[in-house]
Amino acid sequence: MNITMPTPRQDIFYLHLLRCIAAIAVIAIHVLGPFRFLYGEIPFDAWFSAVGINALSRWAVPIFMMISGALLLSSNKPFDARHYLKRRLGKVVIPFVAWSLIYAGISGALANDPQITVQAIVDAPANPTWYHLWFFYDFIPLYFVIPLLAPLLKAMNEEQIKILLAGWLTLTCMHFLKVPSFLREPLVLFIGYLVLGWYLFNRDNRSQLPLWLGLGISAAVINLLGSYWASDHKGAYSALFMGYKSINTVVIGAMLFVLAQSYAERLGAALRRIVTSISTYSLGIYLIHPLLLIPIRSAIERDYAQFGHPAVAIPALTLLTLVVAWALTALLARLPIVRQLVP
């Protein structure tokens, strides 16, 4: 099947659906965070429930990157550097800087030590001031690659693009196996998600859905069983099989992309409105939700059992956090100036 080059519309619903589920998955990953490192300290079923959810959710950040590649690399508008830097890059950089300062202040306030805030700001060029902000350190550089990558992709035929993707998948496998290579850099490995998102976006993948389902479900099973095996072998939590730059994550992300393409339009009108709203506020939800998790994660670390079994507690806390973060983001988005923090 040939690749087509439509002018992307921001309201393509299946992309909204992907953003929505990715936002939910990110929250789940952060809710279950304290459980992961309790291997051998809590009952196995409690620990594995948390790690199982973690293993099945690691595609979240790559999905965000695939959506960016799908939209930004597909644009047929003449490139305007000033507009791009102001509207595209600025929309990400301004919230990143602002929230880095906010979370640096929070870290000092929680420790009742202003020096911790100062040190967090001093270290910010190399280390995020809060755990979820790492994403921007890898994501922002991709914005400088996109204007150079877009014309190259448009000049290539489908067979050449397949070779490009095959090379990236090979590099991803090399990264998993720790084969030495100067190309095993986060920027290079994450660029592949941009290309994969663009590729899947610009072709009809419905006939290949059974293949993607088979591959994706197999990868998910490997994540589950592999996480147990690796942790048991290590005697501690291991993310060996479910890193953001692992082949399993690539396959699961691609499966979900094609699945959303194929079935998103079947959702009812009411659910579509909810999904679209969560998608619209997804960046704000990503930025705000760790604030809400501060007391929750602290309570889990003190006594995880007070929330009930993790198999139930993690989804429930994820849903609660999502709803509150969604409401706060929607409120802040209505306020002048402040709305720039939750674009």
Image (cartoon, rainbow, N blue to C red):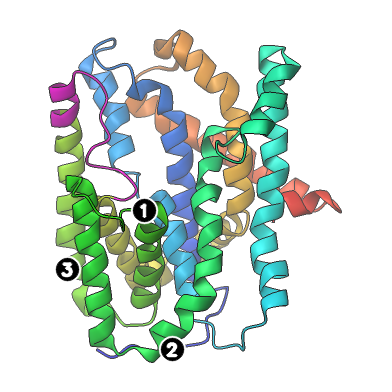
- Image disc number at residue 5: 2
Q: Are marks 2 and 1 in contact (CB under 8 Å)?
A: no
Q: Secondary structure at mark 3?
A: helix
Q: Tell me the crowding category of disc 2: few under 14, some 14 to 19, or many 20 or more residues within 10 angstroms, Cα based.
A: some
Would residue 12 be seen by someone viewing this image from the given angle? Answer: no
The answer to whether 193 appears left or right of 126 in the picture is left
Q: Which residue is mark 1?
A: 185
Q: Amino acid at mark 2?
A: Met
Query: From mark 2 to mark 1, how far is it between C-alphas?
Result: 29 Å
Provide the residue span drawn in magenta. Answer: 229-245
Q: Residue at x 46, y 33 (%)?
A: 30
Percent position of residue 10, x then y: 57, 74
**136 or 42: which is nearer to us?**
136
The magenta stretch spans residue 238: yes
In the image, taking residue 293 as reference, residue 48 lies left or right, namely left
Residue at mark 3 = 210
Label located before the other in sequence (2 or 1): 2
Among numbered discs 2 and 3, the one appearing first in the sequence: 2
